Image (cartoon, rainbow, N blue to C red):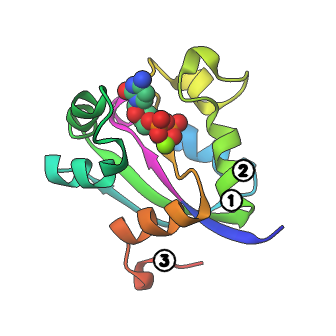
Amino acid sequence: MAIERTLSIIKPDATKRNLTGAINARFEESGLAIVAQKRLHLTRAQAEAFYAVHAQRSFYGELCAYMCSGPVVVQVLQGESAVTRHREILGATNPANAAPKTIRKDFGVSVQENSAHGSDSPTEAQREISFFFAQTEIVG
Ligand code: CDP
Ligand code: MG
């Protein structure tokens, strides 16, 4: 077990419905600390670069359009096994398959509009955190 950092994004479907606080309460109640945070309206270029790993997937174009459709909140979460813990709190990608009491089960609208993003590995977390934050903006 180790203290890790991971990237969280509260997606446009959730900011639009005023769910930022409700989602962040789940993280804080689970022992994850928000150590960096900003509200952004992503450009198409930013969304395409962030999700470049999915460039060949059929949903890539729609995903990038959706991620630019309204404000997002990007943040760094810190805590014990934060990468895995965060993914557990989020639940499965498709809200219909997500476990009870997870964020995507309780707030997600569809497989695309699933309310929040979480890095899927420590390596990816490092890339995603540095995509949005300078080291000086992360205050643990
Ligand atoms: O976000 P997660 O790591 O659970 O899933 P992903 O496979 O990395 O996909 C990234 C994002 O693309 C998802 O969170 C959805 O917003 C979107 N997606 C979609 O629109 N349609 C799919 N069939 C799969 C994913
Ligand atoms: Mg993913």
Q: Nearer the viewer, residue 54 or 4?
A: 54
* Label 3 crowd (10 A; few <14 / some 14-19 / many >=20): some
Q: Residue 38 magenta-drawn?
A: no
Q: Residue most toward the front? A: 56
Choose the circle earlier in sequence order: 2 or 3: 2
Residue 119 or 59: which is nearer the viewer? 59
Can residue 61 be seen here?
yes
124 horizontally vs 30: left or right: left
**Label 2 belongs to which residue?**
85
Check contact, mark 1 vs mark 2: CB within 8 A.
Answer: yes
Q: Secondary structure at mark 1?
A: helix
Classed neighbour count for the residue bearing mark 2: other residues with Cα under 10 Å, few (<14), some (14–19), many (≥20): some
Quadrant where the N terminus sits is: bottom right
From the viewer's perspective, tell me whether residue 9 is left or right of residue 57.
right
Q: Is residue 96 above or below residue 134?
A: above
Rounded to the nearest angstrom, the CA distance separating label 3 from label 1 is 15 Å
Across and down, in percent, residue 43 comes to 16, 50
Taking the image as four quarters, which one is ligand 1 found in? top left
Residue furthest out toward the top: 96
The magenta segment is: 7-18
Tag 2 and tag 3, C-beta contact below 8 Å? no
Residue type (three-letter) at the residue carrying disc 2: Arg
